[in-house]
Image (spheres, rainbow, N blue to C red):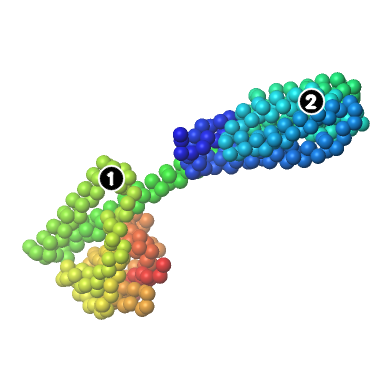
Amino acid sequence: MSAFPATATADGTPAGPVDPAADTAEMPAASALGWVYTVFPALLRLTCGLACAVPALAVRTPPVRTPLLVAVVCLLTVWSVLFAVLVVRWRRPAPAIAVDLLLTVGTCLLIRDLVATEVLPGEVSWVAIQSSTSVIVAQFVLPATRSVPAGLLVAAAYGIGAHLAGDDVEAVGHAITLAVQTGSAAALAGVARRSSRLADAAFAAYQETARAALTARAARAAERQQNRDLHDTVLSTLTVVGLGAVAGRSPLLRERAAADLRTLAALAGSRSTADTDPADGAGPADGAGPTDEVRLVALDERLRALLGRLPELRVGAELEPCAVPAPVAEAVTHSTGEALSNVLRHAPGATASVRLRRDGDTVAVEVVDDGPGFDPATVPRHRYGLRESVHGRMATVSGLAEVDSAPGRGTRIRLEWSDVH
């Protein structure tokens, strides 16, 4: 036996055993409509069966056959309860509707023996109400190809029964009413089913679009991370060499070249892993594991090590002891390194200063130089220095970067991160 009960689809046909959670996630509109089309018919049949019992037994004047009337009323009352159980609990709507229609048709054909002559006209007898209920219930449980013929069958049976009871006006009048109820309820049910299909199709399209956007965003984040790494290592080293900032056979140049080579090897390895298993490409761009988020490192030590790799730059430092999460330290150190590399590239001979302060939950690093300065608004979009290696890196850890500069008055870059979540 399946762990999940069988359900009915939006068109009323049995859908077989399914996982309710999966059904709701994949087709939420159809699932909701199926629930409504299960509960509503059951409640309608149950309330009608119980409510009609009293007025059915209230008038027993000839030609009503009292023993037959009592037997039919008891049968229909018990059936209304069983119908609700079959549809809601046992999820057997099709067999329940078949039995319901059979009992309704039989009741209609026995109108002469079940309804008093003075009660029959006006389409208000308890049999008229029972037949209307069966017609409406069938439209919401069965597909239109079966529910419409079923409704017309009930209309024909009522017409025949009322004719046999001697009231042709009632026979024609309520038969037409039942036919109209059949068409109206079938149209309403059909519109609701079509709307649920359209809603589920739109929901599926939205999910697909969201997945595609997430994949594209992850790929773009990985690409930007690689571009930042290349810019901050290989391209930066080549630029420094090209500008003549490193003289002769420098051990520092050898060390930087070796570090750049390790960076290129790591990038090649991450690209190979992503090609082998695309799911890995959606992970953190910096390659940081889950424990890196909570591991604290000394940011001041990272910055001192950075300054030690730049002996060619005249720079002073005021670094307060400060511990931050590893990804934050990585982003701030790289951004500071890019700011200092910009001094080497664009302001040779300038003096710079680096200051690290912590004020409560806020960590701030300021890099100031007395170089020629520049207009940040005129930096081309294709230049990665400030846009990616500074602003972009700080954004990856929910930090901020502010650049204050103008021609002739130097440059001030402030990096800020707050430990407020």
Q: How many marks?
A: 2
Residue 232 versus residue 269: which sits nearer the camera? Answer: 269
Question: Residue drawn 31% across and 63% down?
Answer: 293
Residue 75, picture quadrant: top right
Check disc 2 and report the residue beneath it.
108
Residue 148 versus residue 70: which sits nearer the camera? Answer: 70
Name the secondary structure under disc 1: helix
Is residue 395 shown to the viewer in this render? yes
Q: Is residue 38 left or right of residue 123?
A: left
Residue 35, picture quadrant: top right
Name the secondary structure under disc 2: helix
Check disc 1 and report the residue beneath it.
274
Earlier in the chain: of badge 1 and badge 2, it is 2
Question: Residue drawn 21% across and 48% down?
Answer: 269
Question: Residue drawn 13% across and 57% down?
Answer: 258
Residue 142, picture quadrant: top right
Q: Is residue 136 left or right of residue 128?
A: left
